[in-house]
Amino acid sequence: MRARWPWVLLLVALLALGPQFLKSYQVYLLSLAAVYALAALGLNLLTGYAGQISLGHAGFLAIGGYSAALLQVKLAWPLWASLPAAGLLTALLGLVLVIPALRLSEIYLAIATLGFGVAVEQLLPQWAWTGGHQGFSIPRPELFGLALNSDLAFYYLILAVGLALVWIAANAVRAPLGRAFVAIRDNELAAQALGISLARTKSYAFLLSAFYTGIAGALYANLVGYLNVSTFNLGLSILLLSMIAVGGLASIPGSLLGAAFLGLLPQVLSGFSAWVPQFIYGAALLLVVIFMPYGIWGFLLQTVGRGRGLMRSARRLFPGPRAESGSTGGDDHA
Amino acid sequence: MLELQGVTMRFGGLKALDEVSFRVEPDRIVGLIGPNGAGKTTVFNLISRFYHPSSGSIRFNGIELTHLSAHEIIGKGIARTFQNLGLFPYLTVMDNLLLGQHCRVRTPVLLQALHLPGARHEDRQMRVRAGQLLEQVGLAQLAPAYVAGLPYGVQKIIEFCRALVARPRLLLLDEPAAGLTSAETEAMAGFIRGARDQFGVTVLLIEHDMSLVMKLCERVIVMDFGQVIAEGTPAQIQHDPQVIEAYLGRPAEEAPHA
């Protein structure tokens, strides 16, 4: 635990100072990856930790983005108010999904959440104030009188919000709440016998997850400066799921790593024809699922971390596809 | 302390429990025995509120349990273990024991997320209590280990500790000695007796190991085909003709002569 701090500080320093040496467009791409990372983190809290699969998270991104944009443009709210408001509004709508989540699990819940995502995508353009299918422009905002029109300035805003949210998530997963998430994921009956309410815990999971994704959506709207419903399609929901699966389920570094990898891939390879990044995306998914059941982060811990302690922390993250029978003993550590 | 009255449980056309009534007096270690399929685990699952009885009442210290939800039972003072382990294999032993104290967490979720001193203080207290209990069963060094890699017998003891760390007044143990070596069974018997003598916990346990039941339990309830067929001290039920019949079948001399 303590030994992690130097690494965290180094990473923060790198994220804070590195962009000074990048071109404006590269900083923009980094910001975009950071927004993905927040959304992936939100999804991982729900799916990786609490075991509730969502195929509708693009819907939460859209709700966060549109509510922030409308508050700012139509009601002239300042960014410092619209950002948390968008998060809270999305969180409340996230509670809607608790209703199917209390009745359904696994693939059936995935289908229900898929329905939610599709419904949001179809409903939003029906209202005049969303700009319909034409889309919606948002001027770069100010924050406390400071114009955030440079890409670098906006990057620092995203970094600050992101670091705060990562810190909160790291606290939450180590607290009783995070343990309750894992408990309902792995054994609902035993969890209940320990006093964990399924309804309450799933509500918290959806609230927290939708809040993170809503904030990410609000940041996305302000970063890109333009919203179009077609962005928030099923493909985006699946991309977010791929990010956490590739990075590492039930892992905060894994969420960030997966988002950085899959989020930046198309941009880094933009010089090639379109099929190249798509091919690598597909191949990466396949290889990770086969060779790195705990995601890139779990793989790094197993490979780089020679100490047994690190190996173990890779195991704790998630059952993994092959670990099903490991629960009743067996010599898994050998 | 615990009182079942006329509890019937139907699964479709199958009557798993038929008018089951019995009492568990405080400070006792009570055995619930019977052949496979007699309905013992169904009784536990009804007390845990995983099932709702078709009819009948289950009272604990005057509280009607059938009005409560499953997650409210431990708050009334009833903890349990599971026949095939209810541990969370991808968490550490310590995390499992912290989950055992989940019903005692008072820090609101928002304060947990901000990692404020109140949350840290509560966390430390729970860790200390879990550590002390592990110390007592001689497994303190396993606190940071992941449950999935531990031997079955050790997992059984850890699950017992997880139930005990909630400081319940009634402990339901579903086959605590199943799959244990005789040395481990011996140790488990000691822990169960210790829980009663040291913490004043009443114990109701399902067990197939008869020598353990006879040694450990002060009262025994025998079930067969969803009914209570006998109740008494171990010595009494050992000589009860109905019990002998349930376990061994009808004596040969009663068979009609040719």
Image (cartoon, coloured by chain):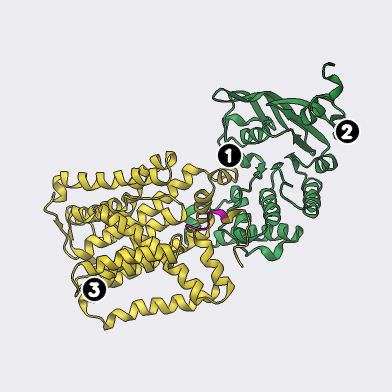
The secondary structure type at the circle numbered 1 is helix
**Does the CB distance between marks 1 and 2 fall below 8 Å?**
no
Left or right of B25 in this view: B40: left
Q: Total of numbered circles in the picture? A: 3
Residue on which disc 3 sits: A269
Label 3 is found on which chain of the structure? A
**Residue position marked by numbered label 2 in the rendering:** B235
Q: Which residues are magenta?
A: A321-325
In terms of depth relative to the viewer, which is nearer, A43 or B221? B221
Determine if the magenta segment contains residue A271.
no
Amino acid type shown at disc 2: Ala
Point 54% across, 24% down: residue: B12
Using the image, tell me which numbered label, if any, was put on residue B165. none
* Colour chosen for chain B: green
Q: SS at mark 2?
A: helix
Q: Residue furthest left?
A: A134
